[in-house]
C-alpha cells in the first residue's frame, strides 16, 4: 500500500487549517492496516487516526504517520419485528449514512442529521444533537488494536460513553477509563434502530417547528428536514466557513454553583439534569461575555452561535491552530473571570 509523503491536511480538517502530515496512509480496508503494521517502520513511528477531521484543531505539522480511515460500505445486518440492525464502514460520511437509512425506511437517526464527520468518528465523541446521542442508537463496533493487530468488538458499555466522551478520547494510561486513544482504529459501527419508531421532539427548537407548522405527528423524514433546517440556520457550513462545530462542552455544575451564577445574571440558560446537577449553555456564557462575532487574528466567534469558533482567513491564508487556541484561551479566561466556570474544549487538539 502506498504511503504518501508531506501531504497537505488542509482538505482533511473542517477548520481548513493548513498543516502537513509527514506520512499519510489511506485505510480503505482493515487489511491495509495489517499490511502497514507488518512493515518494520511501524513500531518506530508515531501514528494518528484521522476520520472526517471535523472535530480537530491542528496546531502544527504532524510528524509520523497519519492513518486516514476510508473504509466504505453500509448494509442491513438484521431485521426483526423489534427493529433494524444497520452497519456502516468507518469511512462513510455520517450525514449520507443517516439520509440513506431514512431512504431505506429505517428511522431512528434523524435527530443526528447534518453532523459533519465520518461514521467511525461518531462514537469517539458520542455525537449528539436535538435530544439524541449516538449511544442511544449504538449497537457495537469493530476495531483493530494498533499494538497487536488483533480485531475486537465493543458493545455500548465497553465504549464508556459519556457526554461528548468515550474510551477513545482517553489515553491508555488513564486507568479510570481504560483509555483506547491512539490504540484502536474503528473499522465498522453497527446501530440498533428499534421498532416501533418513536420521535424525539422534546428539544425547544423542534417544539417551535411543530407549533409553526401545526404538524403534531411528524414522520422521521419531517424531523430530519427540521433538524437540517435548524442546523443550517444556526451553524456555519464547514464547506463555506471553516469550523469544528461546538468548540466547548456545555459545563455541568452543582445547584449551589448555579444559584451563584443566577445571582450574577438571572438570564443564564440552564437545564436541571436527572442526577441533580445542572447543565449550563456554554454558548450563552460566551455570548454574555461579549464574544459573539469577535475576531482575534484569523480566528473568530461565529456571529449566530457563540459556541462555534470559525476560520476567518482565506484558503490561501487560513487561520492557524495556534490562533484558534489563543482565541479559545481568551474566551476561557473571560468566562472564568465573570462566572467562575472553566470551559472545556470539545475538539481533539493535535
Ligand atoms: N445561546 C445563546 N447565545 C449563543 C449561543 C447559544 O444565548 O451565542 C443559548 C441559546 O439561545 C439556547 C442555549 O444557549 O438557549 C443552547 O443553545 P443551542 O440550543 O444552540 O445548543 P448548544 O448547547 O449551543 C448543543 C450541542 C450541539 C447540538 C445542539 C442541539 C454541545 C457542546 N453542543 O449546542 O452540538 O447541535 O446542542 O442539540 O453540546 C457539536 O457538538 O458540535 C454541536 C453542534
Image (tube, rainbow, N blue to C red):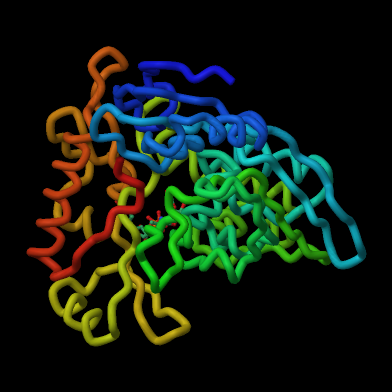
- Residue at image point 37% right, 40% down: 56
116 vs 125, nearest the viewer: 125
The image quadrant that residue 349 belongs to is top left
304 vs 299, nearest the viewer: 299
Q: In this view, does 181 lie above or below 269?
A: above
- Residue at image point 47% right, 67% down: 162
On the rendering, which quadrant does ligand 1 occupy? bottom left
219 vs 324, nearest the viewer: 324
The image quadrant that residue 254 belongs to is bottom left
Please identify the quadrant where the C terminus is shown.
top left
Where is residue 347? Give x, y as percent.
35, 48
Where is residue 158? Give x, y as percent.
58, 68
Q: Is residue 160 above or below residue 305?
A: below
Q: In this view, does 327 lie above or below 208?
A: above
Please identify the quadrant where the N terminus is shown.
top right
Furthest residue to the front?
A: 40
Where is residue 64? Give x, y as percent.
35, 31
180 vs 248, nearest the viewer: 180
Furthest residue to the left?
A: 337
Q: In this view, does 85 lie above or below 298?
A: below
Where is residue 139? Give x, y as percent.
70, 61
- Residue at image point 27% right, 27% down: 61
Amino acid at each position: 500500500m502506498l504511503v504518501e509523503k508531506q501531504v497537505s491536511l488542509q482538505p482533511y480538517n473542517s477548520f481548513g487549517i493548513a498543516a502537513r502530515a509527514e506520512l499519510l496512509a489511506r485505510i480503505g480496508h482493515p487489511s491495509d492496516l495489517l499490511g502497514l503494521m507488518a512493515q518494520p517502520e511501524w513500531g518506530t513511528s508515531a501514528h494518528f487516526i484521522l476520520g472526517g477531521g471535523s472535530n480537530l484543531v491542528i496546531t502544527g505539522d504532524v510528524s509520523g504517520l497519519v492513518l486516514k480511515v476510508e473504509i466504505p460500505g453500509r448494509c442491513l445486518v438484521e431485521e426483526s419485528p423489534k427493529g433494524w440492525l444497520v452497519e456502516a464502514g468507518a469511512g462513510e460520511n455520517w450525514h449520507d449514512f443517516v439520509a440513506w437509512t431514512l431512504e431505506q425506511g429505517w428511522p431512528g437517526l434523524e435527530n443526528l442529521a447534518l453532523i459533519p464527520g465520518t461514521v467511525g468518528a461518531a462514537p469517539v465523541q458520542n455525537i449528539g444533537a436535538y435530544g439524541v446521542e449516538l449511544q442511544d442508537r449504538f449497537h457495537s463496533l469493530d476495531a483493530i488494536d494498533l499494538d497487536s493487530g488483533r480485531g475486537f468488538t465493543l458493545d455500548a458499555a465497553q465504549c464508556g460513553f459519556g457526554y461528548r466522551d468515550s474510551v477513545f478520547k482517553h489515553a491508555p494510561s488513564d486507568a479510570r477509563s481504560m483509555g483506547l486513544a491512539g490504540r484502536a482504529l474503528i473499522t465498522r459501527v453497527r446501530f440498533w434502530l428499534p421498532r416501533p419508531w418513536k420521535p424525539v421532539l422534546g428539544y425547544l427548537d423542534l417544539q417551535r417547528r411543530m407549533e409553526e407548522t401545526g404538524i403534531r405527528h411528524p414522520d422521521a423524514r419531517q424531523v430530519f428536514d427540521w433538524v437540517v433546517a435548524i442546523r443550517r440556520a444556526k451553524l456555519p457550513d464547514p464547506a463555506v466557513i471553516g469550523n469544528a462545530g461546538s468548540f466547548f462542552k456545555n459545563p455541568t455544575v452543582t445547584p449551589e454553583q448555579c444559584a451563584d451564577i443566577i445571582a450574577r445574571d438571572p438570564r443564564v440558560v440552564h437545564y436541571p439534569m436527572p442526577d441533580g446537577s445542572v447543565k449550563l449553555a456554554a454558548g450563552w456564557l460566551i455570548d454574555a461575555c461579549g464574544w459573539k462575532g469577535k475576531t482575534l487574528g484569523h480566528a473568530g466567534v461565529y456571529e449566530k452561535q457563540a459556541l462555534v469558533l470559525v476560520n476567518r482567513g482565506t484558503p490561501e491564508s487560513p487561520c492557524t491552530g495556534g490562533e484558534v487556541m489563543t482565541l479559545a484561551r481568551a474566551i476561557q479566561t473571560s468566562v472564568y473571570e465573570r462566572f467562575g466556570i472553566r470551559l472545556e474544549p470539545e475538539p481533539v487538539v493535535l
